[in-house]
Image: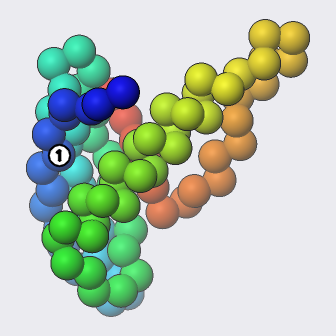
Amino acid sequence: METTEKIRITSKTLASGNCQVKFFVEDEQRPQYGYLLVTEPKPVGDIIEEIKNRLEKRRMDSMNLNPFFPLAPNTEDTNFYLFSA
């Protein structure tokens, strides 16, 4: 399945030295936004790839719900937050 969403990012350096990246997923059917905490300097392309990978992981986790044991997958990723826009 090919994704056609567009990702825009803005970032700011925190007092801790980490970088907070705010991203917007511009998808007509399901717009989203979120935050990613980056602990080391990375190129923009690598940050966008990491966001895409984490979004795909979230999608795959949500599709793997067992109908006989419907518990949401455990997503303990404290450096990645995703919201519906």
State the residue in front, 25 or 66: 66
Residue 71, x across and y down, in percent? 78, 25
Quadrant where the image shows the C terminus: top left
- Location of the N terminus by quadrant is top left
Q: Quadrant of residue 4?
A: top left
Instruction: Name above or below for residue 33 compared with residue 11.
Output: above
Which residue is at 27% across, 70% downward?
Answer: 46
Location of residue 81 with respect to 66 vertically, above or below: below
Query: Residue 73: horizontal and vertical position, in percent?
Result: 70, 35
Q: Residue at x 13, y 61 (%)?
A: 10
Looking at the image, residue 79 sits to the left or right of residue 5; the answer is right
Element carrying mark 1:
strand
Residue 53's spot in the image, x, y percent? 41, 52
**The residue positioned farthest toward the front in the image shown:** 1
How many C-alpha atoms fall within 10 Å of the one at disc 1: few (<14), some, or many (≥20)? Answer: some
Q: Quadrant of residue 28?
A: top left
> Where's residue 36, x and y in %?
36, 61
Q: Amino acid at mark 1?
A: Ile
Furthest-right residue in view? 68
Q: Quadrant of residue 68?
A: top right
84 is higher (above) or lower (below) than 25: above
Residue designated by label 1: 7
Q: How is the image coloured?
A: rainbow
Residue 15 appears anywhere in the view:
no
